[in-house]
Image: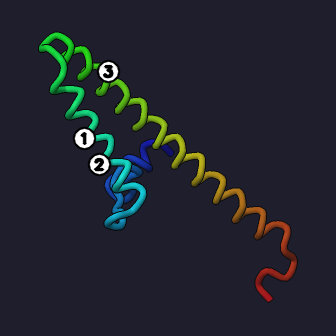
Amino acid sequence: MGRFSCGTAISPDIWTFEKDSQYEQALSDVLRSGDELTASLNDEQKIIFQKYADAWSELMSIITIKNMTHGYKMGLLMTAEAFVTSKDFFD
Protein backbone atom coordinates (compact mmCIF):
# COMPACT_ATOMS: atom_id res chain seq x y z
CA MET A 1 0.00 0.00 0.00
CA GLY A 2 2.84 2.38 0.82
CA ARG A 3 4.44 1.74 -2.57
CA PHE A 4 1.10 2.41 -4.22
CA SER A 5 0.73 5.76 -2.50
CA CYS A 6 4.26 6.79 -3.51
CA GLY A 7 3.84 5.84 -7.16
CA THR A 8 3.39 8.17 -10.07
CA ALA A 9 -0.41 7.76 -10.18
CA ILE A 10 -1.10 8.93 -6.64
CA SER A 11 1.12 11.11 -4.51
CA PRO A 12 0.02 12.20 -1.04
CA ASP A 13 2.46 15.12 -1.14
CA ILE A 14 1.30 16.84 -4.32
CA TRP A 15 -1.93 18.80 -4.20
CA THR A 16 -3.22 22.26 -4.85
CA PHE A 17 -4.83 24.80 -2.58
CA GLU A 18 -6.89 27.93 -3.05
CA LYS A 19 -5.31 31.36 -2.99
CA ASP A 20 -5.81 33.15 0.33
CA SER A 21 -6.80 29.87 1.96
CA GLN A 22 -6.01 28.89 5.54
CA TYR A 23 -3.37 26.50 4.16
CA GLU A 24 -1.68 29.24 2.13
CA GLN A 25 -1.58 31.52 5.19
CA ALA A 26 -0.09 28.79 7.38
CA LEU A 27 2.50 27.93 4.74
CA SER A 28 3.42 31.60 4.39
CA ASP A 29 3.82 31.88 8.17
CA VAL A 30 6.07 28.82 8.29
CA LEU A 31 8.27 30.06 5.44
CA ARG A 32 8.56 33.59 6.84
CA SER A 33 9.35 32.34 10.34
CA GLY A 34 11.94 29.92 8.98
CA ASP A 35 13.61 32.69 7.02
CA GLU A 36 13.66 34.96 10.09
CA LEU A 37 15.08 32.19 12.27
CA THR A 38 17.74 31.23 9.74
CA ALA A 39 18.83 34.85 9.39
CA SER A 40 19.43 35.02 13.15
CA LEU A 41 21.59 31.86 13.33
CA ASN A 42 25.31 31.46 12.93
CA ASP A 43 26.69 28.91 10.45
CA GLU A 44 26.92 26.05 12.96
CA GLN A 45 23.38 26.68 14.20
CA LYS A 46 22.11 26.79 10.60
CA ILE A 47 23.56 23.32 9.99
CA ILE A 48 21.88 21.96 13.12
CA PHE A 49 18.58 23.62 12.24
CA GLN A 50 18.73 22.23 8.69
CA LYS A 51 19.24 18.71 10.09
CA TYR A 52 16.22 19.25 12.33
CA ALA A 53 14.11 20.56 9.42
CA ASP A 54 15.15 17.62 7.21
CA ALA A 55 14.28 15.09 9.94
CA TRP A 56 10.92 16.81 10.54
CA SER A 57 10.17 16.76 6.81
CA GLU A 58 10.97 13.05 6.62
CA LEU A 59 8.70 12.36 9.59
CA MET A 60 5.85 14.33 8.01
CA SER A 61 6.29 12.39 4.74
CA ILE A 62 6.05 9.09 6.62
CA ILE A 63 2.95 10.25 8.49
CA THR A 64 1.34 11.50 5.27
CA ILE A 65 1.84 8.15 3.56
CA LYS A 66 0.55 6.25 6.60
CA ASN A 67 -2.53 8.50 6.79
CA MET A 68 -3.24 8.06 3.08
CA THR A 69 -2.83 4.29 3.33
CA HIS A 70 -5.06 4.14 6.40
CA GLY A 71 -7.74 6.28 4.74
CA TYR A 72 -7.65 4.17 1.58
CA LYS A 73 -8.03 0.95 3.58
CA MET A 74 -10.93 2.44 5.54
CA GLY A 75 -12.62 3.38 2.26
CA LEU A 76 -12.17 -0.16 0.96
CA LEU A 77 -13.63 -1.63 4.14
CA MET A 78 -16.64 0.71 3.97
CA THR A 79 -17.21 -0.22 0.34
CA ALA A 80 -16.93 -3.93 1.11
CA GLU A 81 -19.37 -3.58 3.98
CA ALA A 82 -21.88 -1.81 1.72
CA PHE A 83 -21.72 -4.70 -0.75
CA VAL A 84 -21.95 -7.40 1.92
CA THR A 85 -24.67 -5.90 4.11
CA SER A 86 -26.97 -4.41 1.48
CA LYS A 87 -29.40 -7.02 0.14
CA ASP A 88 -30.92 -4.70 -2.41
CA PHE A 89 -27.71 -2.88 -3.37
CA PHE A 90 -28.17 -3.58 -7.07
CA ASP A 91 -31.99 -3.21 -7.17
Quadrant in which residue 16 is drawn: bottom left
Which of pointers 3 and 1 indicates the residue nearer the eye? 1
Marks 3 and 1 in Cβ contact (< 8 Å): no
- Of label 3 and label 1, which has the lower sequence position? 1
The residue shown at (37%, 28%) is: 56
Query: In this figure, which residue is indicated by the disc labeled 2?
Result: 28
Amino acid type of the residue that numbered disc 3 sits on in the rendered structure: Tyr
The one nearer the camera, 56 or 68, is: 56
Amino acid type of the residue that numbered disc 1 sits on in the rendered structure: Arg
Label placed on residue 32: 1
Dot 1 crowding, Cα within 10 Å, few <14, some 14–19, many 20+? few
Query: In this figure, which residue is indicated by the disc labeled 3?
Result: 52
Marks 2 and 1 in Cβ contact (< 8 Å): yes
Quadrant in which residue 80 is drawn: bottom right
Amino acid type of the residue that numbered disc 2 sits on in the rendered structure: Ser
The residue shown at (72%, 61%) is: 78
Residue at the extreme left: 43
Marks 2 and 3 in Cβ contact (< 8 Å): no
Q: Position of residue 23 (x, y in %)?
A: 40, 55
Q: Does residue 69 appear to the left or right of 83 in the view shown? A: left
- CA separation in Å, label 2 and label 1: 6 Å
The residue shown at (23%, 23%) is: 50
Quadrant in which residue 24 is drawn: bottom left
Above/below status of 30 relative to 47: below
**Label 2: which secondary element:** helix
